[in-house]
């Protein structure tokens, strides 16, 4: 039986990464074998490409090509084998992020992104996507207090508003797998939303 594929999405500063490990712990306690990974990254090659993406200047097409190159290796080396074993895969970002960031954020042609998506992972899509939704302004405040920003985190609020709009379109288009999480509230309240949604799937 194919394993389940759960992704965590949202703009930088939405707080999504904070909730991945608690979900992993809950699923493990329920008897699941869980693989936790991230994008860009997840393999030695993809992590090297991640460093370039986060720090080296480049245009939107180059970004998209590097993201999908990293994803190709990640899918082949980590995600697909884990799902084939029946494991549950928790991934910090996946293709929805590409349509939100490079598509809506950078204004890159979504038709090209769809073509790259079909080449790289064909029909592989998440079974469940948690979308951590927060305003660009609140996300920026959190980032300013957390760490030195990378090339994406340095973008202005207008850019992140476009990215949020991109996520909203994805959530409307793929409503059967998207669960919106209001991440403007405190951490415990966010956690309750996530765990309630997970319990609702009887996983």
Image (cartoon, rainbow, N blue to C red):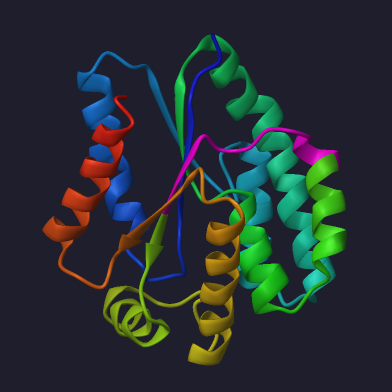
In front of the other: 120 or 164: 164
Image spot of residue 169 (x, y percent): 59, 66
In this rendering, the answer to whether 141 lies above or below 113 is below
Image spot of residue 24 (x, y percent): 30, 32
Instruction: Check the picture and name the quadrant holding the N terminus.
Output: top right
In front of the other: 35 or 168: 168
Residue 23 left/right relative to 180:
left
Residue 202 left/right relative to 128:
left
Residue beneath the point at 29% across and 37% down? 198
Residue 36 left/right relative to 64:
left
Residue beneath the point at 21% across and 58% down? 190
Instruction: Check the picture and name the quadrant holding the C terminus.
Output: top left
Image spot of residue 55 (x, y percent): 62, 71
Residue 66 visible, this angle: yes
In this rendering, the answer to whether 179 lies above or below 1 is below
Residue 152 visible, this angle: no
Magenta stretch: includes residue 126: yes
Q: Where on the picture, by quarter, is residue 136?
A: bottom left
Residue beneath the point at 63% across and 69% down? 101
Q: What segment is highlighted magenta in the picture?
A: 119-130
Q: Where on the picture, by quarter, is residue 134?
A: bottom left
Q: Where on the picture, by quarter, is residue 167?
A: bottom right
| Number of marks drawn | 0
In front of the other: 193 or 149: 193
In this rendering, the answer to whether 158 lies above or below 1 is below
Magenta stretch: includes residue 109: no
In this rendering, the answer to whether 144 lies above or below 16 is below
Image spot of residue 120 (x, y percent): 80, 40
């Amino acid at each position: 039986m194919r394993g389940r594929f759960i992704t965590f999405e949202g703009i930088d500063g939405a707080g999504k990464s904070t909730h991945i490990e608690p979900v992993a712990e809950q699923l493990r306690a329920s008897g699941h074998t869980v693989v936790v990974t991230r994008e860009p990254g997840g393999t030695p090659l993809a992590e090297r490409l991640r460093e370039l993406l986060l720090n080296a200047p480049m245009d939107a097409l180059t970004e998209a090509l590097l993201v999908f190159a990293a994803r190709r290796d990640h899918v082949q080396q980590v995600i697909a084998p884990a799902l084939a074993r029946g494991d549950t895969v928790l991934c910090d970002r996946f293709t929805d992020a590409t349509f939100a960031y490079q598509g809506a954020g950078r204004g890159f042609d979504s038709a090209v992104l769809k073509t790259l998506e079909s080449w790289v992972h064909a029909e592989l899509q998440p079974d469940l996507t948690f979308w951590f939704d927060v305003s660009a302004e609140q996300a920026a405040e959190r980032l300013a207090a957390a760490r030195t920003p990378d090339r994406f985190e340095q973008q202005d609020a207008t850019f992140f508003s476009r990215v949020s709009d991109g996520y909203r379109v994805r959530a409307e288009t793929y409503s059967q797998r998207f669960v919106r999480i209001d991440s403007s509230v405190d951490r415990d309240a966010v956690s309750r939303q996530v765990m309630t949604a997970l319990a609702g799937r009887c996983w």
